[in-house]
Image: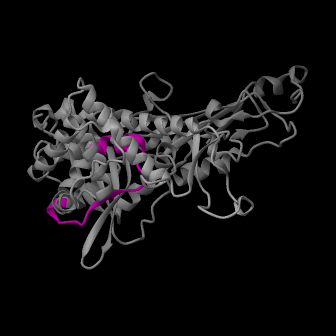
């Protein structure tokens, strides 16, 4: 890590040119997001060039205290370079001057150490890492087993997915990847590599130089196998990360396909994802919908539901309606495809939408009415009433349109009520529900478009 104060040498040579150190007024600080940049480089020549890959962390501010600001520096710039080969890092820090403007001078070293740990080295050592082969990547790949799945990487045979137990070289590799995990996966924490049952799936590209195989890491998934009563195993996907230079090439999708493949082949109980991002959920739902489209047992129930939406006038309904598949079908999907109930219900609505004619306003209105009834039931209660629940809009600094559910007593004096009362204007509640429905419809349409473009020939005939 290098700290450089601009103009220091010139000022030392001529005392008359020394600038007075100090800020006018109270130091407002600078947000880490504004002064810190992170880059992934594949060779030393990419440092500072347009060829390097800029990493866009979800939020650097949260590493720097409650307000996310750095204090005591003028014109601070922090550039961190991460090697795509060894995952070591080097931090180049420059500023004009420092001064305590009322809130002290932020000590940058411990903060950077908390992010990058032992990966952070001095520049000379960092440059030297590019000339050395990272044995732990090759060893981890060699000790693992390649997943052989038809069509996984037909267009590029040099790329493969390798399944490894998280120990030895693989555990060391994971420790090198922790800074990228902290920077790029929101809310992530390093997994406990000492805990039994952890595995990694590595997406690697193999090259051969002088009869020696070398491997470049493109992405990975960390998964955990844990016991499910009475004698089965559940699989939880904890982290999936495709390195920035290779994002958008389908590696994340193929990782999910590989996980589904061995979950089925090994008769895993089911597959879950720990706190998936919106995009990961989008990819997951797209894959599962494509799998379900070729799964014959769902077709009769799906066709029946679609026909009902086309023929029934739901606008005059007197009770709530739900597009719920038969219980035995949910169990069949769970057993055969390892899709859990919550995920199947999400995909079921998408499959129904795909099977409807978007130009048929009646069926589309009916579909939206079912989504409305489901969301209202989940938030406020059953169709017969709200069970004392009220949906209230709550203002906050982070989200101006956040909602909360409050419970009120069904009986008793008003003086006994200890929670918020029902809003006087019921139209507000209706508007808020419709906003939630609109958001849900947008998600359904987004996945449906992706599925339609990938597997149009698999759609159920209307």
Place of residue 60 in the rendered image (x, y in percent of width and height, measured from the top left)? 59, 40
Residue shown at 14% from the left, 43% from the top = 303
- How far across and how far down the image is residue 442, in percent? 38, 33
Q: Name the residue furthest bottom.
A: 230
Quarter the N terminus occupies: top right
Q: Quadrant of residue 141?
A: bottom left
- Which residue is at the front of the view, 200 or 93? 200
In this rendered view, identify the residue nearer to me: 419 or 111.
419
The reply, left or right, for residue 283 in relation to residue 33 is left
Question: What residue span does the magenta drawing correspond to?
Answer: 264-285
Determine the residue positioned at 62% across, 37% down. 425
Residue depicted at 22% across the width and 61% down the height: 327
- Residue that appears at 69% across and 44% down: 108
Q: Is residue 32 magenta?
A: no
Q: Quadrant where the C terminus lies? A: top left
Residue 395: % across, % down: 66, 40
Tally of marks: 0
Can you see residue 57?
A: no
Q: Looking at the image, which is closer to me, 84 or 295? A: 295
Picture quadrant of residue 51: top left
* Residue 203 rendering spot, x and y as whole percentages: 27, 46
């Amino acid at each position: 890590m290098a700290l450089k104060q601009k103009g220091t040498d010139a000022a030392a040579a001529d005392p008359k040119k020394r600038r007075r150190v100090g800020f006018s007024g109270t130091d407002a600080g600078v947000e880490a997001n504004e002064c810190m940049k992170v880059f992934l480089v594949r060779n030393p020549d990419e440092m500072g060039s347009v060829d390097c890959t800029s990493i866009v962390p979800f939020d650097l501010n949260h590493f720097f205290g409650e307000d996310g600001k750095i204090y005591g520096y003028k014109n601070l710039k922090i550039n961190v370079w991460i090697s795509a080969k060894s995952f070591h890092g080097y931090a180049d820090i420059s500023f004009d001057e420092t001064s305590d403007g009322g809130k002290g001078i932020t000590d940058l070293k411990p903060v950077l150490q908390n992010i990058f740990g032992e990966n952070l080295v001095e520049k000379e050592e960092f440059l030297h890492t590019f000339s050395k082969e990272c044995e732990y990547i090759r060893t981890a790949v060699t000790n693992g087993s390649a997943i052989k799945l038809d069509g996984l990487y037909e267009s590029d045979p040099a790329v493969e997915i390798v399944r490894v137990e998280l120990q030895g070289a693989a555990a060391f590799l994971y420790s090198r990847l922790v800074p990228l995990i902290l920077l790029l996966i929101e809310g992530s924490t390093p997994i406990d590599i000492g805990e039994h049952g952890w595995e990694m799936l590595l997406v690697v590209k193999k090259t051969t130089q002088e009869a020696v195989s070398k491997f470049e890491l493109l992405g990975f998934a960390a998964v955990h196998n844990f016991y499910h009563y009475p004698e089965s195993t559940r699989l939880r996907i904890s982290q999936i990360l495709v390195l920035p230079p290779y994002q958008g090439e389908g590696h994340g999708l193929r990782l999910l396909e590989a996980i589904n493949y061995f979950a089925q082949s090994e008769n895993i109980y089911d597959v879950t994802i720990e706190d998936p991002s919106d995009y990961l959920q989008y990819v997951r739902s797209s894959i599962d919908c494509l799998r379900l489209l070729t799964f014959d047992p769902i077709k009769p129930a799906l066709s029946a539901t679609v026909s009902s939406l086309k023929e029934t006038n739901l606008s005059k309904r007197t009770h709530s309606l739900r597009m719920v598949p038969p219980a035995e079908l949910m169990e069949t999907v769970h057993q055969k495809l390892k899709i859990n109930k919550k995920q199947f219900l999400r995909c079921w609505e998408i499959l129904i939408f795909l099977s409807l004619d978007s130009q048929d306003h009646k069926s589309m209105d009916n579909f939206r009415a079912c989504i409305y009834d489901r969301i209202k039931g989940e938030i406020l209660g059953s169709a017969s009433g709200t069970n004392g629940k009220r949906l209230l809009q709550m203002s906050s600094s982070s989200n101006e349109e956040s909602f909360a559910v409050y419970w009120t007593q069904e009986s008793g004096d008003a003086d006994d009520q200890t929670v918020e009362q029902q809003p006087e204007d019921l139209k507000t509640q209706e508007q808020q529900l419709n906003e939630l429905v609109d958001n849900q419809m947008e998600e359904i349409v987004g996945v449906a478009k992706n599925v339609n473009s990938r597997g149009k020939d698999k759609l159920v005939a209307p």
